[in-house]
Amino acid sequence: QQQVKQSPQSLIVQKGGISIINCAYENTAFDYFPWYQQFPGKGPALLIAIRPDVSEKKEGRFTISFNKSAKQFSLHIMDSQPGDSATYFCAAISGNTPLVFGKGTRLSVIA
Amino acid sequence: DTGVSQDPRHKITKRGQNVTFRCDPISEHNRLYWYRQTLGQGPEFLTYFQNEAQLEKSRLLSDRFSAERPKGSFSTLEIQRTEQGDSAMYLCASSLVSTPNNSPLHFGNGTRLTVT
């Protein structure tokens, strides 16, 4: 049972465009929603995270939008750059339960 | 570099052999996790420790897998009688747990296991 559903599986965006990745969850006990970025041969690295008491969090070109009633959250990458090409994972956690991940989105930013 | 360190980076072994991986977490982190990642998938939870206590094991962790964290510092993950289905990237992560909020998980760069 996939606890966090992520889409799309892959995404191609022009340089300077906006990349949008969506995630949905079922467990209303989740209280922390991080996004991880992973380059080939590397472990996932924390990119940005949000708690459900806010609807949006922005850090530089990266923004998380959170819709608690719809149980959905999304990552927006503004002014996408070729260096952003990586696999992105949404994740969720509650209390002492382990972090659960979506299946990932492979982003390619083309010039 | 004071991040999470994993050793070895790559391991090729023949089916039926035993393998052991090591993880050194960030020094002040009290929680340590093991995840497994196969190609095109997100990391899947295997087990985690708080200090030296193993608190949870996934049903993915068969009897052939064992993990230890002696003295609450580094951890080892051993796979006995490896099978081709064990081929994956094994990721270690650590975090600092303190009331009321947990710190985020910091991952190492993993050990890639290939079972031939």
Image (cartoon, coloured by chain):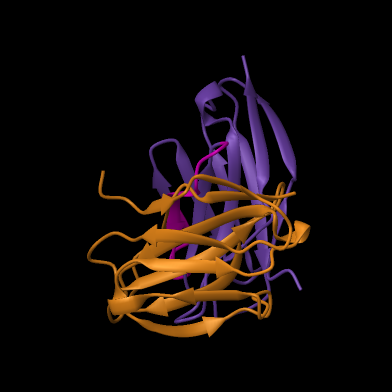
Q: What's drawn in magenta, residue-wise?
A: A40-57
Q: Is residue B20 placed above or below A22 in the rendered structure?
A: below
Whether the magenta-drawn stretch holds residue B73 is answered as: no
Residue B105 can be seen in this image: no
Position of the C terminus of chain A, as image quadrant, is top right
Tell me if residue B114 can be seen. yes
Q: Quadrant of residue B52?
A: bottom left
For this orientation, the residue located farthest to the top is A111
Residue B79 in the image: state x and y as whole percent. Answer: 60, 67
Asked whether, in this view, residue A69 is left or right of residue A60, the answer is: right
The mark tally for this picture is 0
The N terminus of chain A - image quarter: bottom right
Q: Residue at x 45, y 82 (%)?
A: A96
Residue A51 on the magenta span: yes
Residue drawn at x 68%, y 71% is: A3
Q: Nearer the viewer, residue B85 or A84?
A: B85
The image position of residue B32, as x and y in percent, is 40, 69
From the rendered image, report the letter of the chain displayed in purple: A
Nearer to us in this view, B55 or B99: B55
Chain drawn in orange: B
User: Residue at point 38% right, 75% down?
Assistant: B69
